[in-house]
Image (cartoon, rainbow, N blue to C red):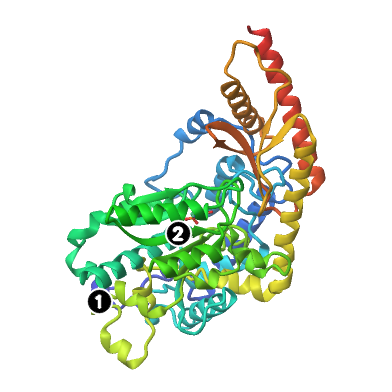
Amino acid sequence: MSHESLDAPPESRPTSDAESVDSLFLGSEVGAESYRDAIEQSIDIVAKAFGEADSPYTGASPEAVEAQLASFDCLPEEGAGLDETLDHVSEEILAETIRVAHPACGAHLHCPPVIPGLAAEVLLTAANQSLDSWDQSGAATILEQRMVETLAETFGYDDEADGVFTSGGTQSNFMGLLLARNKVADERFDHWVTEDGLPPEADRLRILCSADAHFTAKQSAAQLGLGENAVVSIETDDEHRMSVDALDETLDTLDDQDLVPFALVGTAGTTDFGSIDPLPKLAARAHEHDLWFHVDAAYGGALAFSDTHHEKLAAIECADSIAVDFHKLFYQPISCGAFLLQDGTNYQYIQRHAAYLNPESDDEAGVPNLVSKSVQTTRRFDALKPYVTFRTLGRKRLGELVDSTLELASETAAYLQDSDRFACLHTPTLNAVVFRYVPEHVPSDTDTDQYVGTLNERIRDTLLNEGRAVVARTEVDGVASLKFTLLNPRATWADVESLLDDIERIGSDLEATTEASR
Ligand SMILES: *Cc1c(COP(=O)(O)O)cnc(C)c1O
């Protein structure tokens, strides 16, 4: 090398340097080889961590895990290399995570990911497309649109429909209410929110949903500048569905108060009970009162694939917008959801053009830039996961997987209803089962609800701390309760029965120690 080397073109870099940079990226033979090694090692780690886990969690406390991770150097001056780093992650991090595929992991709407979805995740991550513009995605943009069309058809929409993949129900619910707010401001107050902010009448705007609706209805109202007091919670019936009588009364009251209800959120699968609001009646009220009807089907949307249960979603096609999550009952790796819009022209309410990304000339030339359909800019090619899964398994098979989990939930509820050690708190609509352990006796000088609630909470904590099971707790009528969310198609009645036996044992041990300490 002469003194000219400073100005030398890149191809004259010393080979070893060039090779080592190449090995960090896809794009050359060296890179492809290095990728293969890294992924193969990762596969071994996954198989070791999640292949045959005998418990859903180690039971380590937050303090213990915090102490263990406290010594990790998150930003070393010099790297340790991938082999060592992957070993470290495998042994010291993944080993202390929740094993979502274990049959006793049944707390939240948190599914075991199906293998075709995991394969797709590998592909889309490496392809690293961004769905905001055509020139960052090519076929990925078109595939997402084909998936949106397919989903729209599945939920009974016609070809006016549109939509977009989202990070999940939170974002999809937000988008539904965002469009609804902007539309009502335009139509009733002749006010264009994206330019002029909220109209002076904004403090009269109201969103209606059931008392059991997901908290993101309120969160969205807060983010939309309406405040969460703009959300009017309608009481529910015995089965935790919105009461239509209560809805009618509320609509009358709001009218008398000169308030402006503009959106009605129906839930198809409430987070706690899995109950489904009476969608046909809600659709009729929305139509009558000129409300934007949004259906939060984040959980229950998967019933659309079931030959046995799809009727439970009747009238969902009347919704102006639908939220559906694939990372719940469609078994996709997190995150993966969709927002569907009955009338795609409503996207005008969030239309936005950036010269560098989606100039209007692209629209005229028919170049699809999905950025204007989303509240995200850079966006993953998550549509590939359900695409690969649907193609691999087909609708029927997916529907059957869902059906089997609903059957297990029914069986579980029937057992709980027959047992005097448990109280089953509802008849499951989906696969969530809410119940309580019933103590053998309640000490005479204690508040029964409080005693029962504390006991059930401690059962849940014991199961987690022993690494025996991940079970949810929630509150029903102010009393803590237990919840199984039986999403896992591999979970059997034998798994549930043995878990209930353990709950009984833990419950009676806790009762004995409480008695002894009195
Ligand atoms: C899970 C869920 C949400 C929130 O969705 P994320 O995917 O967690 O953002 C909203 N509504 C319902 C009914 C849900 O079950």
Mark 1 element type: loop
Residue depicted at x 46% and y 38%: 72
Residue type pointed to by label 2: Val
Give residue 518's position: percent from left, percent from top.
63, 6
Asked whether the viewer can see residue 491, the reply is no
Return the mark for residue 11. none
Give residue 208's position: percent from left, percent from top.
41, 55
Q: Closer to the camera, 321 or 282? A: 282
Q: In the image, 22: left or right of 314?
A: left
Q: Which residue is mark 1?
A: 354
- Which quadrant of the view contains residue 422? top right
Residue depicted at x 62% and y 73%: 388
Q: Earlier in the sequence, mark 1 or mark 2?
A: 2
Q: In the image, 104: left or right of 236?
A: right
Q: Which residue is mark 2?
A: 265
Residue depicted at x 50% and y 53%: 245
Give residue 408's position: percent from left, percent from top.
76, 51
Residue type pointed to by label 1: Ala
